Image: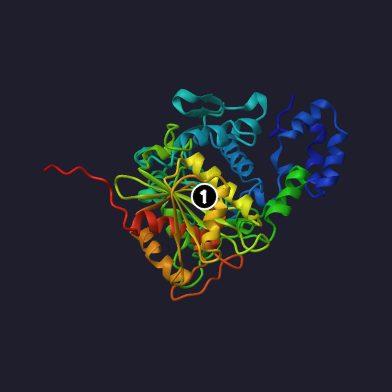
Amino acid sequence: MTRLYEPMAMIADALADLLDLAPEARLDWYASLSQEEAQAIAFHWPLWARAEQVAPHGDWQTWLICAGRGFGKTRAGAEWVRMIARTDPHARIALVGASLAEVRGVMIEGESGILAVSPPDHAPRWEPSLRRLTWGSGAQAFCYSAAEPESLRGPQHSHAWCDEIAKWDNAGERATSAWDNLQMGLRLGEHPRVAATTTPRAVPLVRRLLDESEAGDAAVTRGTTWDNEGNLPTRFVNRMRRQFARTTLGRQELDGELLTDIEGALWTRALLEECRQAPPPLQGRGSGGGATQCTRIVIGVDPPASAQGDACGIIVCGSDEEGLATVLVDASVERASPEKWARAVARAAEKWEADRVIAEANQGGAMVESVLRAGEVSLPFKLVHASRGKVARAEPVAALYEAGRVRHAGLFAKLEDQLCGLKVGGGYEGPGRSPDRADALVWALTELMLGRFVKPSVSVI
């Protein structure tokens, strides 16, 4: 039986003509094949790939696929690696992901990973203990974690596939260090190359590669989730359109748009990326999860003026013994009645074993506390009154971020969109009518980091 890159003689001529057919016509032709012919053709990637999933022509060193979720980035990267391994027996390929677990689970063993796209008789030998793939041609690929930049110092490669580079850990400039160490080791073969696949986020490494593309040093492919709509479940597509159409998160994660900062914003997206860390595996201080490091946990609440108005901002934050704060979760609820948002506060307080609830009382005064009491929130309250504007209250909190004293345990898209909409000197240009989530965060972090809370101590007389 002839394999995917040596098509059967009886259909070799037909393949060239088939590449010019529309996808629907290709499917009809494919359905007419025998089982043997169909299996041979099923792995012929140029036949099924969209044009933007194939490496561009030209003398590029870096190919950046910057597109929305579901675009087919992983498949494109895996097929590119397979093509290199097939055509270059001397290839030494680096596979770099946010972690070794992601390299294995997504890039190698995933539904669109290297093993899945390889025909059975030409699949590479996978040795997990050695973190190595070996093809029959002699080509090899090796696994690396971007969280360990030093692991890329020393090894030499001819090619590399870097997946979801926007997810790479930015703390201590690990992401750029990993990329730089990889680049310095790309010195095998006549034309070393890198394929980088990612959903666009305004992290330093992605911005740097886009800048390089403008200088002609990198080729960039842009795309959206909808480009691959024909290969995605209809229910998924409809749900994504219904939930995220015309939202900032949808523009980034689905439309593949790199969101830019508002001029004069208190928070920038690059600043928020620098403070991001992995979310705690469990919640609460008594569960053994990441929140166990918090010595104090508070919940900031920005109640809505009415159930038909803005969302109720509910942000859980904690501080540790080193004087660092962590935003643990955004539990905000939208278009909620007083009873509903009060119950949401109660659930968050119980789940995270909070020490106090900080609620803005401007909209309802003592009514806010009454609603929360009715929602079975039994922990201490602190009602705060906004004597200054939202931006003025937020400025000292933004300074905490600049000083590296606040971290985000995960990605909080709606909250971060609001933070990036607050401008120095006043004004709000973010989504929605009011930065309710950002306001709740400001109240929580002000209490934790800027309030007059004094840590208990023991005095010796």
Residue at point 49% right, 47% down?
410
How did the renderer colour the structure? rainbow
Q: Residues within 10 Å of mark 1 (few under 14, many from 20)?
A: some
Q: Position of residue 30 (x, y in %)?
A: 83, 37
Q: Amino acid at mark 1?
A: Leu
Camera sees residue 208:
no
Q: In this orientation, which residue lies closer to the viewer: 344 or 15?
A: 344
* Rendered view: 15 above or below 240: above
Residue at point 46% right, 28% down?
131
| Picture quadrant of residue 363 | bottom right
The residue tagged 1 is 411
Q: Position of residue 415 (x, y in %)?
A: 53, 57
Residue at point 50% right, 36% down?
91
Left or right: residue 37 compared with residue 185: right
- Helix, strand or loop at label 1? It is loop
Q: Position of residue 103 (x, y in %)?
A: 51, 36
* Rendered view: 361 above or below 129: below
